[in-house]
Image (cartoon, rainbow, N blue to C red):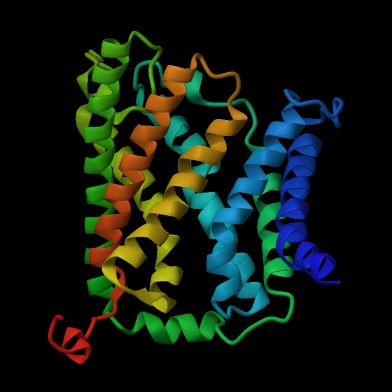
């Protein structure tokens, strides 16, 4: 009985979320199942959805959200951190005339929207089956921790820090790709866009403005979690970094098969993890609630 309860309560929900995400992607693309073999697109979509579910489970399941709020928080994270926001940024770069950005714009973003809303709905229903206490009204009350101007400064500064981290990691990615003799490590590289001579195309200020908007969409979904999560600075940093890394980088990368080489994959994962850690650390300082540790209660050493 215990094994059945463990499977239903621990393993089954993430598996169902992964299947739902993959099914929505397949429906949106009109491809159907195309067979269930290891290298099939459906299998990669399933793995991507499964990994996102596992990463978000602690945030959705352990915080007592109301079910509708859990759905909204999950949808905001998948929307702002995932491929849909990347698509919007690439589209804006194309409109601005940034060189090479047109190739980054997929023809249709509907499958990604269907997938993220399916996954968010299943997360809200399966991870919060009995609902909870924290709803939208509770979040509005918690927002009063800072004034609107204070939140604007904190989020604007966090987006600026995220943009700066992206530019630094982009420069390291260009150097690493040249040193390792591998293809480019990043799809949208703000450093490469700024360093590329565009002539009469996108100006650096346009690229920076679009990059800042993309960074704002990336970090804004962390606010509901920051309003209710409280821990040490390291704990808060790890939670933010994990969400940013899995949803924003690792899960979308799984869907983007095949990989050029194992060396390319290792370098890409390392850079993505470093960027997520930097942004998570900045988020912990600017919007996180840090719990003070009372070391006096522990008594003298020894």
Residue 274, given in percent of the width and then of the height, sits at 31, 41
* Image vertical order of residue 88 relative to residue 153, above or below: above
Residue beneath the point at 59% across and 66% down: 72
The answer to which quarter of the image holds residue 295 is bottom left
Q: What is the residue that sits farthest to the left in this orientation? A: 300
State the image coordinates of residue 159 (x, y, percent, origin top left). 28, 52
Q: Quadrant of residue 231?
A: bottom left
Q: Judge left or right: residue 36 versus residue 84.
A: right
- Would you place residue 201 above or below residue 53 in this image? above
Q: Is residue 295 left or right of residue 81?
A: left
Q: Nearer the viewer, residue 249 or 232?
A: 232
Residue 47 lies, in percent from the top left, at: 67, 40
In the rendered image, is residue 186 in sight?
no
Residue found at the far top of this picture: 181
Q: Nearer the viewer, residue 150 or 178?
A: 178
Q: What is the quadrant of the C terminus in the image?
A: bottom left
Percent position of residue 235, x then y = 35, 66
Q: Quadrant of residue 288?
A: bottom left
State the residue at coordinates (73%, 58%): 11
- For the point 65% across and 31% down, the residue is 108
Seen in the picture, residue 6 relative to 260 is either above or below; the reply is: below
Q: Residue at x 40, y 12 (%)?
A: 183
The answer to whether residue 131 of the structure is visible from this angle is yes
Whether residue 297 is situated above or below residue 268 in the rendered picture:
below
Q: State how many labels appear.
A: 0
Q: Is residue 14 left or right of residue 275?
A: right
Q: Nearer the viewer, residue 69 or 60?
A: 60
Q: The N terminus lies in which quarter of the figure?
A: bottom right
């Amino acid at each position: 009985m215990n094994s059945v309860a463990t499977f239903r309560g621990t393993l089954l929900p993430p598996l169902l979320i992964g299947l739902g995400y993959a099914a929505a992607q397949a429906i949106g693309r009109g491809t159907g199942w195309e067979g269930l073999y290891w290298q099939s697109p459906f299998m990669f979509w399933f793995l991507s959805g499964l990994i996102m579910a596992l990463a978000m489970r602690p945030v959705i399941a352990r915080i007592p959200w109301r079910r509708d709020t859990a759905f909204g928080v999950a949808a905001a994270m998948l929307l702002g951190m995932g491929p849909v926001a990347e698509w919007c940024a690439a589209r804006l770069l194309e409109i601005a005339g940034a060189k090479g950005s047109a190739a980054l714009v997929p023809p249709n973003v509907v499958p990604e929207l269907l997938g993220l809303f399916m996954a968010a709905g299943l997360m809200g229903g399966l991870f919060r089956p009995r609902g909870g206490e924290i709803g939208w009204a509770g979040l509005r009350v918690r927002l009063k921790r800072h004034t609107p101007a204070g939140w604007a400064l904190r989020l604007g500064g966090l987006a600026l820090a995220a943009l700066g981290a992206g530019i630094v990691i982009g420069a390291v990615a260009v150097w690493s790709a040249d040193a390792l003799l591998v293809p480019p490590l990043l799809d949208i590289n703000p450093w490469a866009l700024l360093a590329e001579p565009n002539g009469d195309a996108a100006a650096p200020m346009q690229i920076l403005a679009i990059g800042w908007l993309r960074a704002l969409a990336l970090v804004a979904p962390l606010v509901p979690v920051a309003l209710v999560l409280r821990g040490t600075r390291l704990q808060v940093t790890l939670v933010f970094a994990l969400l940013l890394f899995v949803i924003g980088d690792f899960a979308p990368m799984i869907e983007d098969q095949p990989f050029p080489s194992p060396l390319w994959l290792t370098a890409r994962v390392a850079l993505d993890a470093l960027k997520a850690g930097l942004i998570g650390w900045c988020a912990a300082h600017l919007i996180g609630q840090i719990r003070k540790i009372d070391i006096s209660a522990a008594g003298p050493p020894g």
